[in-house]
């Protein structure tokens, strides 16, 4: 069976695709597994808040078919109350565009009744506000002067996928670049521009893993940038990967022998 796989990004990324045929596949972890584990990192996955347990009171999330996500209409007289576990990140997304700095306030409490107002991290477009929740907390979100329609996301860490079972690199129909993180061997990635899909022909049952890094503009005033990657199968939407790109700060990253701001 021949399948066409296409990928589309909402931000400039560099992409790697690895595949493995599953037919009759049985293999135990081999000697490469222990060596590869330190190089793998848990990925940050954003879950759209649709209700309990995160939602406690206030305006309820409603599914918006046009946006493809649950939205909350926040009014000044109706604060939203959330519960978030420790080591969570909260993201507020305003689909209509840039939010004014004083459009809303976010207050966090440990349950004692005392609240503090942490400064948010903003993305370049001003549509996303990011808050890091260190301890299990109550979070109050309140609009100031006008109603706001927001999507709320809570981040969770997914354990790394074993890469040792994926041995065959898919060649994509564009020129590859070499990406090297300090003191490691270089890897081949393929540039993917926003709204310019890449197409790959696959034959037979396959399992694929998509690895990518995000190229970030040097003029960004934040080290955090939301990234969305859409994957279609046979021309139909298959998966949408939504992540937060964080600049690799502790190690230099070279792209074709030039140091660039690249995500982990």
Image (cartoon, rainbow, N blue to C red):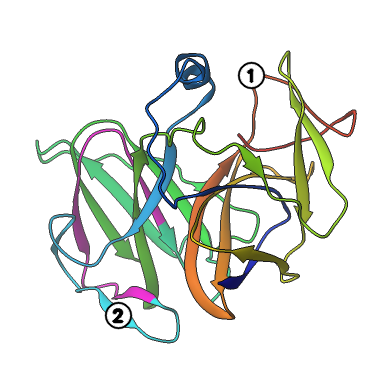
Rendered position, 250 above or below 96: above
Residue 203 in the image, given as x and y percentages of width and height: 60, 64
Direction from residue 154 to residue 55 in the image, left or right: left
Q: Is residue 90 magenta?
A: yes
Direction from residue 47 to residue 243 in the image, left or right: right
The furthest residue to the left: 112
Task: Report, in whole angstroms, how far the alpha carbon at label 2 lies from the one at label 1.
Answer: 40 Å
Figure quadrant of the C terminus: top right
Q: Secondary structure at mark 1?
A: loop
Rendered position, 96 above or below 171: below
Seen at 36% across and 40% down, the residue is: 158
Give the labeled residue for mark 1: 250
Give the labeled residue for mark 2: 63
Residue 136 in the image, given as x and y percentages of width and height: 18, 36
Could you tell which of marks 2 and 1 lies nearer the N-terminus? 2
Write down the quadrant of residue 211 in the picture: top right
């Amino acid at each position: 069976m021949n399948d066409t796989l296409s990928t589309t990004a909402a931000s400039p990324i560099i992409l790697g695709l690895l595949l493995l045929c599953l037919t009759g596949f049985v293999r135990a972890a081999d000697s490469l597994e222990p060596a590869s584990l330190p190089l793998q990192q848990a990925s940050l996955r954003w879950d759209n808040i649709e209700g309990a347990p995160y939602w406690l009171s206030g305006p309820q999330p409603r599914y918006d078919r046009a946006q493809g996500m649950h939205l909350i209409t926040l009014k000044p007289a109706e604060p939203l109350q959330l519960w978030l576990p420790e080591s969570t990140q909260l993201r507020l997304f305003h689909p209509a565009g840039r939010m004014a700095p004083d459009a809303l306030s976010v207050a966090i409490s440990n349950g004692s009744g005392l609240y503090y107002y942490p400064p948010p991290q903003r993305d370049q477009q001003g549509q996303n506000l990011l808050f890091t929740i260190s301890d299990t907390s109550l979070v109050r979100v309140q609009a100031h002067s006008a109603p706001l329609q927001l999507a709320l996301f809570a981040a969770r860490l997914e354990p790394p996928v074993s890469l040792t079972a994926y041995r065959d690199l898919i060649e994509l129909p564009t020129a590859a670049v070499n990406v090297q993180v300090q003191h490691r061997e270089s890897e081949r990635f393929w540039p993917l521009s926003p709204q310019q899909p890449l197409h790959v022909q696959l034959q037979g049952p396959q399992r694929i893993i998509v690895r990518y890094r995000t190229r970030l503009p040097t003029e960004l005033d934040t080290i955090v940038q939301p990234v969305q990657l859409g994957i279609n199968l046979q021309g139909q939407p298959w998966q949408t990967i939504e992540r937060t790109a964080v600049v690799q700060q502790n190690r230099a990253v070279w792209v074709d022998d030039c140091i660039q701001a690249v995500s982990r």
